[in-house]
Amino acid sequence: MGGLCRLRIEDIDPLRSKPDLIDAIVADLAWLGLTYPEPVRRQSRHMESYRATLQRLIDRGLAYPCFCSRGQIRARAAAMADTAHDPDDAPLYPGTCRGLDPPIRAERLARGEPHTWRLDMPAALRCAGDALGYETFDAADTRWIAADPSRWGDAVIARRDVPTSYHLSVVHDDAAEGITHVVRGRDLEAAADLHVLLQCLLALPTPRYHHHALILDPDGEKLAKSRGSQSLADLRQAGVTPEELRARLGFA
Ligand SMILES: [Zn+2]
């Protein structure tokens, strides 16, 4: 399409983001022959921007602090007969903290009680209206897909440890970097519904999306470190060339 490919290091997780993993990504891309403009955006250096974006949602009453632990949410879901699940198969949050009395909420925040921030989905949908959707693209054409963010329920938009989440940061950065086309795996297709909602609430443009089939191992399973899947570095060490790899993936 004559576009420019960008590299972004999504390192909001302070425990899992290690410098040697970032070096490995850079080395793999260089070996593949993919180039991108410098400097590379590192999300861990933009926490203040994410905090400000989160605050905009809080100020408009579209996000609230949730003091529930994961264990509490799981236990509550287990106690109910028919718990609905989100597209990632996590039980939908029942909205326990959405209705907390404002003085109690303020007191728990002032006490520094650990909390995430959740999107108030009913309020967000009222604010965004119901014509949400996005354009997908492939080599042949573009198509309009209607989005249904409600299936995520009151999604976590800021984690306990950082003032952001994958969803909030990616929406913020796609706009900040002027991203027009996003190519990513089908495992993120459902997340696009939430991203479109956040873009609408924050008055940010919606890029076009292409969600491609996942590369599977010979058993038809998703590649995963925990399954001992071959990494790019493994293939490189085994003598596979970038040309062979591209051919294997269906690129000319
Ligand atoms: Zn809660």
Image (cartoon, grey):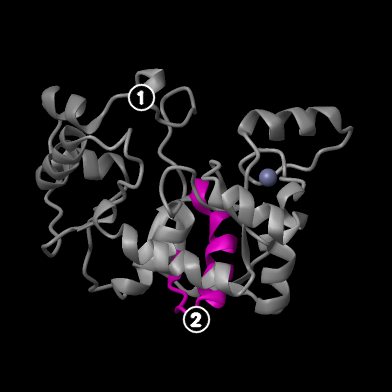
Residue nearer the viewer, 150 or 223: 150
Judge left or right: residue 209 versus residue 201: left
Circle 1 Cα neighbour tier, 10 Å, few/some/many (<14 / 14–19 / ≥20): few
**Residue at 79% across, 28% down:** 78
Judge left or right: residue 190 versus residue 14: right
Judge left or right: residue 50 versus residue 129: left
Q: Is residue 54 visible?
A: yes
**Residue at 23% across, 62% down:** 6
Q: CA distance from mark 1 to mark 2?
A: 38 Å
In terms of image quadrants, where is residue 147? bottom right
**Residue 148 in picture, x, y percent from top left:** 68, 63
Pick whichever of labels 1 and 2 is earlier in the sequence. 2
Write down the region rendered in magenta: 186-209
SS at mark 2 in the image? loop
The verdict on label 1 being within 8 Å of ligand 1 is no
**Residue 171 in picture, x, y percent from top left:** 43, 65
**Residue 120 in picture, x, y percent from top left:** 68, 62
In terms of image quadrants, where is residue 102? bottom right
Q: Is residue 135 above or below residue 22?
A: below
Q: Which residue is mark 2?
A: 203
Q: Amino acid at mark 1?
A: Lys
Q: Which residue is mark 1?
A: 225
**Residue at 75% across, 54% down:** 100
Q: Amino acid at mark 2?
A: Ala
Q: Is residue 49 above or below residue 204?
A: above
Q: Is residue 235 above or below residue 209?
A: above
Judge left or right: residue 77 versus residue 112: right
SS at mark 1 in the image? helix
**Residue 251 in picture, x, y percent from top left:** 27, 51
Q: Examine the structure image and report whether residue 91 is included in the region drawn in magenta.
A: no
